[in-house]
Structure formats: structure tokens, C-alpha cells
Image (cartoon, rainbow, N blue to C red):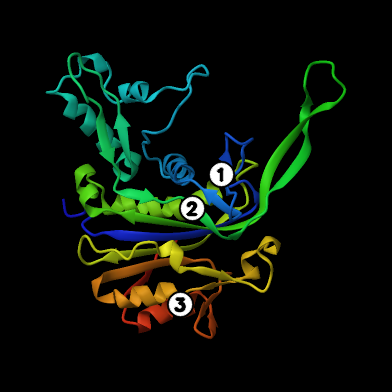
Amino acid sequence: MSNIINNREEILFLFDASYCNPNGDPADENKPRMDPETQINLVSDVRLKRTIRDYLREVKGHEIFVYAPQDEGIVPDAKTRAKDFYGDLKTITNENKSQLDDNITSKCIDVRLFGATIPVEMKGARDTSIIHTGPVQFKMGHSLHKVGVERIKGSGAFAATEGRQHTTFRVEYIVPYSFIAFYGIVNEYRAKEVSLTEKDLEDMYDALWNGLRHLTTRSKTGQNPRFLMTVRYKEGKFQISDLDRKVKLKSDMDDLQLRSVKDFILEMDDLVNVITKAKDRIEKIRLQIDDDVRFSLGDQVIDAEGFKEKLSKNGITVETFGFW
């Protein structure tokens, strides 16, 4: 198929979180995930993928495999979810296991993007599960500055028990502000295994940018996309890698005082330099940039248009996503 992904891509996604909890740690009172040595705020790739999946299912109308519709309060396991696409898994044999695989892979965009482990048990057989390593993978996200955590106490809307005159109390943890970077990669060889298409990838980028705005729970509201860049290469195997480490945050304020994207600029010299060195291997770069973001290159402070213009002058094809 001509629309199957044939080129490797790298992804740099930057967003911020204001007075919310971008990724709670259930093993630590659901506090925001932190590196205790550096005070760097962490966000797992699992959290980001969940945001993408929710948007793809609820807004774009895609079928999602790693989604647990509850029936009478019961959360199904992966085997139960697989039954939705085949029926009685006891009838699966080596000869027809591919039918289950095809059903799930062709219908579920998240399997084509991120892969999945589909448990199948057959008598007398070992290693019968269907395993796909997804072509799209993200590293752990991390803030570009030190982040503080605040403990907030509040009252609930209802009493703890019937007849009580006082409402319940709640405790939650938030970050006042965190500017977070994610690095991702699209592997063209894995893409062929699951038939990942250009349309799938376009929908994922839409979900990556707009998914944060779709989060409306009290702990997640306050996150906004600020910068999305994808680098598509002309040939396989080559990649720059670690694009998230090429961006630095600069401010006259202390890290813990930051409260807005307007409190700092993003130093892009390292990023532009490595891209320019690899320009002969790059097919194109695509960008979506929030209007409030400012960049520094050398001694210049520039806006989104200035950043695009700089890349174009260096001989790189630059396109804009155009998401609302």
C-alpha cells in the first residue's frame, strides 16, 4: 500500500502544566512524578499515550484496543478485550490465530501506533500470545527546569456518611508550573509490520496537540501544547536522536518562580545546529507552535515565524500542521 509509512520520523513535543497534576504516581499518594535528586518533573509515556488514545476514541471516533469499558463495575483484562474482536478464544489455533491478529490490528489504531500484547492460550503450545512492538514510541517526559510540588487541602461536596453535618476533606498535590519535553520516534520497519498509514500518523499528531485540551478532569485541566516538531528523513536507519536534550530553558527568574510560558525563552541553538548538519538527510520538518512561545538563536530573540524562517534559510523544507 502506497500510504504505509516508509520514512523514519522523530518527534519533539513541548507542553506546559499550570496548577495541576500532569502525571500522578499511585505508589506515592498520587503526587506528581518527580526525580528526587534534581527536582525535575516527570511524565510517563503511558500517561501521554492514554491522552492520545482518549482523544482518538472520543473525538476522532477510532476503535481503541487498550481501553477498558466497564460492565457492572468490572474492568476487563486483555484477554476479555480480545474476545470483542473474535469471540470464543478457545477456538483459536495456530492456523487461525492470524485472523484474530488481523481483526485487532486492522480495527485498532492504537495497536498500529503503539503495539500491544494480545494473550492467546492454546493447549500444548508455548509463547502463543500475539506481540506487536509499536512503531511509535516515546521516552519519559521531563521538565526543562526544577519544579515545586504544592499540597492543597479542600472540602468535598458531600458528608462522609448520612446525617453528618460536615463535608469530607480532600488532599491533592499539584505543580504550580512545569514546562515538559517529550521525545518520540516513528520506526518505518515496525510501521510495515502493522500497516501504519500516513492517515494514522496524522490523526495521532492531531491527538498529541489537541489531546491535552481534551483533558477535563480537575487534576489534569491546565495543560496546553506549546511546540510540536516532527523531522522526517529521506532514508531509513538515520536519526539525530534525543531532540529533547537540544532545547534549553532560559529565564532571569528562579526555576521555582516560573508560572507562565511568557516567563522564559527557549534556547534553540543546539537543536538548529544538529538539524542543519543533517539537512541532506531530512525530507521535511513540520511544526506547530503556540504564539506565546519565544526562542533565542545566537543573540536574537525570535517568535514562531522567525524560527520557521531560520530553518528555511538553512535549506530545510518546513511545513505547518495547521491544527486549531
Identify the amino acid type marked 3.
Asp
Q: Position of residue 220 (x, y in %)?
A: 60, 45
Identify the amino acid type marked 1.
Asn
Local crowd at mark 1 within 10 Å, few (<14), some, or many (≥20)? many
Left or right of 250, for residue 106:
left
Is label 2 in contact with label 3 (beta carbons under 8 Å)?
no
Q: Position of residue 23 (x, y in %)?
A: 56, 44
Numbered mark located on residue 23 in the image:
1
Is residue 196 visible in the rendered structure shown here? Answer: yes
Question: Is 102 situated above or below 230?
Answer: above
Question: Is 120 situated above or below 275?
Answer: above
Numbered mark located on residue 92 in the image:
none
Question: Is 227 situated above or below 275?
Answer: above
* Residue under the point 32% across and 36% down: 116
Local crowd at mark 3 within 10 Å, few (<14), some, or many (≥20)? some
Among the 4 quarters of the image, the one containing residue 25: top right
**Counting residues from the N terminus, which is met first, the one under dot 3 or under dot 1?**
1
Q: Alpha-carbon distance for marks 1 and 2?
A: 10 Å
* Residue under the point 29% across and 36% down: 107
Please state which of residues 244 and 18 is positioned toward the viewer in this rendering: 244
Q: Position of residue 114 (x, y in %)?
A: 34, 43
Numbered mark located on residue 269 in the image:
3
Is label 1 in contact with label 2 (beta carbons under 8 Å)?
yes
* Residue under the point 53% across and 78% down: 296
Q: Secondary structure at mark 3?
A: helix
Residue where numbered disc 2 is placed: 141
Left or right of 211, for residue 121:
left
Question: Is 86 situated above or below 279?
Answer: above
Identify the amino acid type marked 2.
Gly
